[in-house]
Amino acid sequence: MNELMREGWAGTKSDVFDTLKQKHSHTVGLFEPETGRLVGMATVAILRTFHGVEARIDNVVILKEYREQGEGERLMRYVLSLAKAHHAEWAELVCGRERLPARELYRKVGFEESQGTVFTKML
């Protein structure tokens, strides 16, 4: 977990555990099969709004040495399937303009840029 926090998780360990306890929020870990090392994670929150059910995806992080090997795509596809299983109608995430590889990944799994830094995908 410490490695992921250095790679881009903005919260503290306490934040991670608080997130894990939430009823409609799921933090998903991606583990290296041989070692069990945590190499990636993402959080998806299911929000019931007046407009329908939304999946808000946040804190998508993959360790640098595991990037550009399909692990981010695998993680995102799993998170999206989890959102669909919770009856989400669309998913949103925010991605900084400077994060070009991440933006490319989100487009690859079907997201469309909707407000400059907000990406939306109909489920």
Image: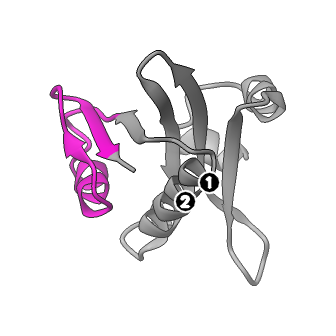
Given residues 112 and 66, the one toward you in this image is 112
Q: For label 1, count other residues whose C-alpha is less than 10 Å away and answer few (under 14), some (14-19) or many (20+).
A: few
Residue at the spot of label 2: 81
Residue at 56%, 48% (x, y): give it: 83
Q: Residue at x 31, y 51 (%)?
A: 102
Res 92 → quadrant: top left
Query: Colour mode?
Result: one colour
Q: Is residue 41 visible?
A: no
Alpha-carbon distance for marks 2 and 1?
A: 6 Å
Discs 2, 1 touching: Cβ within 8 Å: yes
Image side of residue 12 versus residue 62, left or right:
right
Amino acid beneath label 1:
Ala
| Local crowd size for mark 2, using a 10 Å CA cut-off: few (<14), some (14–19), many (≥20) | some
Q: Which mark is residue 85?
A: 1
Q: Quadrant of residue 101?
A: bottom left
* Relative vertical location of residue 32 with respect to residue 106 in this rendering, above or below: below
The three-letter code of the residue at mark 2 reads: Ser
Q: Nearer the viewer, residue 92 or 34?
A: 92
- Give the magenta-colored segment's residue range: 94-121
Residue 61 point in image, percent of width and height: 51, 48
* Quadrant in the picture for residue 119: top left
Residue 110 is inside the magenta segment: yes
Q: Residue at x 72, y 80 (%)?
A: 33
